[in-house]
Amino acid sequence: MSDNYEPQAEHKFTFGLWTVGNIGRDPFGSPVRRQLSPVEIVHLLAEVGAYGVNFHDNDLVPIDATPADRDQIVADFRAALEDTGLVVPMATTNLFGDPAFKDGAFTSNDHKVRAYALQKTMQAIDLGVELGAKTYVFWGGREGTETDASKDPADGLRRFREALNFLCEYVIDQGYDLVFALEAKPNEPRGDIFLPTTGAMLGFIETLDQSNMVGVNPEVAHEYMAGLNFVHAVAQAWEAGKLFHIDLNDQAFGRYDQDFRFGAVNLKSAFFLVKFLEDVGYGGNRHFDAHAYRSEDYEGVKDFARGCMRTYLILKEKSLQWNEDPEIKALLEEINADDGSTDAFKGPYSADKVAALKDAKFDRVALGARGLPYERLDQLTIELLLGLR
């Protein structure tokens, strides 16, 4: 492999304990890989060149661990981080795996479950901050319904809002340097998950008491499950100042959550995603929430992890080439040409601009007749990606 595509700390590539530690179990088959310990996973990630490791609380500390067990596990994990130089940029809580959360966590109809979910999350926030996390992700995998007879969705949203408001105040009260990132998904494991898209999350955030400290963590596969354009979702989050974290993987449109290696399916879409992130100067972590094919042993898992990072770096290089390609630049200049004839209408609203715009004469036929060379532009993009430019 070329040194040009070797990951460096500056690239901020991260993986979760649950990603490279995935043991290959699925609804139709037993595990195919042994369970690695968190310490082993840290060393595996260091070997492939990752920058950081993220975790759910119970990826690191089993849900039934004693306080003594918890302290030993955390100490061993911290020692592995120190040995390898990996960092923990993000943490989250598993509020979906235990049977207690079968009807949701923050949105459960059972008030005791809702209280337990808050308790569990506060303890997990403490753990994440203890290990250096600056971002805390919320994925409400069980926050939804199979039948609308079971739960009023307005009640569900109200309960979710109350929980996040409570937890925001907890973080502020503790003096933690931490922000929240909400992760949307349309379905699976629930039939319908509340707030199913990044856009829905962005709207919901504005109803929170501390909306300034809450953003989003969009995931490629989750938007593709709903047949949506992920780059557009990321752009909306960025433009709103809410792109606090991002989950990179890949996915065939309309399928179950596949979590394939980044760029493995929709390469052109992955290219435009990387191009967007690099063009706008996104400075956050690039987290790969994906896992290796079930066919792989742990050498194959390393190939998977290296492949995620390598593909990102290749596409980063391609995006620079795209931006500097003379023919592409010429086409973009032609497409976006401005002869200055509408300057009087640009900028903020004013009565003078309204009057000028109402009096302006436009050649509607000529506007409709103008050709836009998007076919050529797209073909040049394909040729660049295929190495012909």
Image (tube, rainbow, N blue to C red):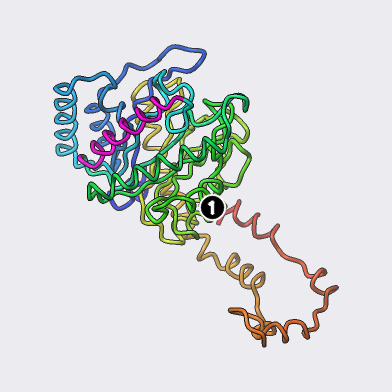
Q: Residue furthest right?
A: 365
Q: Nearer the viewer, residue 387 or 283?
A: 283
Residue 363 placement (x, y as % from top left): 82, 78
Kindly identify the residue that appears in the image at 48 percent across and 28 percent down. 142
Quarter location, residue 118: top left
9 within the magenta span? no
On the rendered structure, is 106 left or right of 36?
right
Q: Which residue is mark 1?
A: 272
Amino acid under disc 1: Phe
Kindly identify the residue that appears in the image at 79 percent across and 72 percent down. 367
The magenta stretch is 110-130
Density class for disc 1 (Cα within 10 Å; few <14, some 14-19, many ≥20) is some
Q: Nearer the viewer, residue 265 or 87?
A: 87
Residue 219 placement (x, y as % from top left): 48, 41
Q: Quadrant of the N terminus?
A: top left
User: Residue 113, relative to residue 55: is it above or below?
Assistant: above
On the rendered structure, is 112 left or right of 260?
left
Q: Nearer the viewer, residue 289 or 153?
A: 153
